[in-house]
Amino acid sequence: MNQWLTVENLSKRFGGIHALDSFSCHFGQGEVVGLIGPNGAGKTTFFNVLGGMLPADGGSIRFCSKQLVGQSPHRIAHFGVARTFQNLRLIRQVPVIENVMLAFRHQSGEHLVPLAIRWKKVRAQESENHEKALAILKKVGLLEKADDLADALSYGQQKLLTLACCIASDADLLLLDEPLAGVSPVMIDIVLEKLRELKNAGKTLVVIEHNLEVIMNEFDRVIFMDSGRKVCEGLPDEVRNDPRVIEAYLK
Amino acid sequence: MEYLLHILILIGIYMMLSSSLNLVAGYAGMLSIAHAAFYGVGAYTVALMSLNLGTPFLLNIICAIVVCGLFGAVVGIPSLRIKDDYFIIAAFAFQIIAFSIMNNWVSFTKGPMGLPGIPQPNLFGWEISSYPEFLLLTVIMCVVCLLICRRITHSPYGRVLQAIREDEDFALSLGKNVAGYKISVFVIAAMLTALPGALYATYISYIDPSSFTVDESIFIISIMIIGGAGRFLGPVLGAIVLVLLPELLRFVGMPNSIAANLRQILYGAALVACMLWRPQGLVGRADVLRK
Ligand SMILES: Nc1ncnc2c1ncn2[C@@H]1O[C@H](COP(=O)(O)OP(=O)(O)OP(=O)(O)O)[C@@H](O)[C@H]1O
Ligand SMILES: [Mg+2]
């Protein structure tokens, strides 16, 4: 297993709560890893610390030989880390397509100097991105909603849209926080299909998930955490039958 | 006729002021109450330079833009890197301090007596002195200012500003340098106030601190909100409506002493009416100011 993303002794406290307690794990490129554990286990906190949204209290995160601890969130995103949020985040008052276009990296029109003196280039890139955004929306089945406000989408469609944003960002590492929670059964199949497509495209996916069926069928590997610690990891089958996992869910 | 031209020039000045504020407050969602202070810094820079140094108008404007930008950076950089709450306080503090300096540093700004006799502008040999000429200058400045605003708002940069207004964390997670955007747009807006500042100082040919008070900032904010914050055309329309509204009062024969007070009431009423029936402003989308 190549050490593409290595997390060592990551710690995060909120007052007396150890949301992450010497949490260590590693991910190989192209893996689809399930991150599971009871409520309050620290899963979302792990994503927040990994993405730089919360400062770590200790430990290290090495991603493609870069140290992520101590970096600002936008730098980390630029390294190729994208995420979705458990409490859906989108720019609701702008059209769906604008959300996707926002997600592209390296847009020259986002900087003032090219905006002032290289307007032609900015315009050209913008129309190129517009086409790309339409293609992505088509892929996730939101093409006919492209010009609606993001707010007007159903919950499941909004989750698809956040996935579309991840696709647009072309990140290599995707952190998906419960992408299926609250989504209708029909929509679940669509989302799962998109996840498989992302895997086939060589992306690395870390997915927080509670649904046992999904855990068993979709993930290459599962990490089980509780109280901020990694309890065990392995193939979905192994983790499912691990006595410590069963105990954690019973307590 | 001159009266009409005067009103049109005023409308132009407020269009520039509220459109530049709109970049910061309407698009990026940071309500700054210091806009009149920057406007004052621009006006005083132009007035002091032309009175004391006799430098040409264009150079004065350029210096005013730079000075406004520097003050914008001084206010914005420390506060916007931390939290929006600090920014609101820093902007308010700057408004108060800038006014105090204009009002109290008598040896430099002449204090409440103001600066009379500001020379009329001269652009490449074009002496601007009559009303139509000032209107032409206003139109030129307005077009430049609005073109800059439009370039900014209708671009990927403007899209990021809106994203910051709606959800900073989402923008961060997509790799946008949120603090950088906030600071840069705030500095740009401050720089843009130099244009109406220069115009006002040379057009009226007299400035005193009372034109750059908190009240003036609130008036600029009202124009933006009533017109429609976060829309390019919002402040344009808002400036027309709010500058014309009190003039209409005068038209129906209201004595000046009453009209002046009624003006304040009218602005208040217009704001309240807006909040009740069109919180998005005259041309705005719904919910832009929800947060
Ligand atoms: N910003 C915060 N401030 C204080 N405490 C927090 C904060 N974020 C998380 N916590 C606490 O840290 C612990 C871990 O929370 P976290 O959200 O990471 O859990 P989770 O595994 O994502 O749970 P869930 O399955 O419910 O989403 C919880 O006890 C939570 O109350
Ligand atoms: Mg969670």
Image (tube, grey):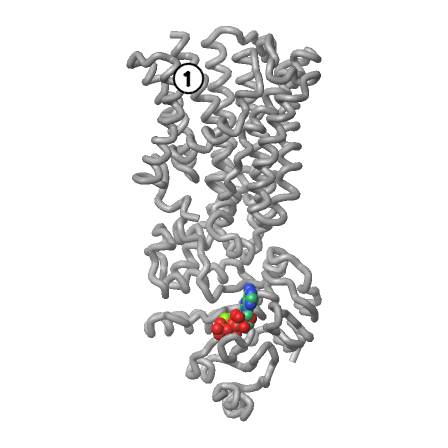
Q: Which three-letter amino acid code belongs to the residue tagged 1?
A: Leu
| Residue at x 66%, y 11% (from the top left corner) | B51
x and y percentages locating residue A59 in the rendered image: 70, 71
Q: Is residue B19 visible?
A: yes
The residue carrying mark 1 is B8
| Residue at x 54%, y 86% (from the top left corner) | A235
| Residue at x 50%, y 35% (from the top left corner) | B151
Q: Nearer the viewer, residue A138 or B274?
A: B274
Q: Nearer the viewer, residue B47 or A222?
A: B47
- Left or right of B74 in this view: A185: left
* Chain of the residue where label 1 is placed in the rendered structure: B
Vertical order, A102 against B155 (above or below): below
- Left or right of A152 in this view: B126: right
x and y percentages locating residue B238 in the rendered image: 39, 29
Dot 1 alpha-carbon crowd within 10 angstroms: few under 14, some 14 to 19, many 20 or more: some
Q: Quadrant of the N terminus of chain B?
A: top left
Q: Tag 1's secondary structure?
A: helix
Vertical order, A66 against B133 (above or below): below
Q: Is residue A205 visible?
A: no
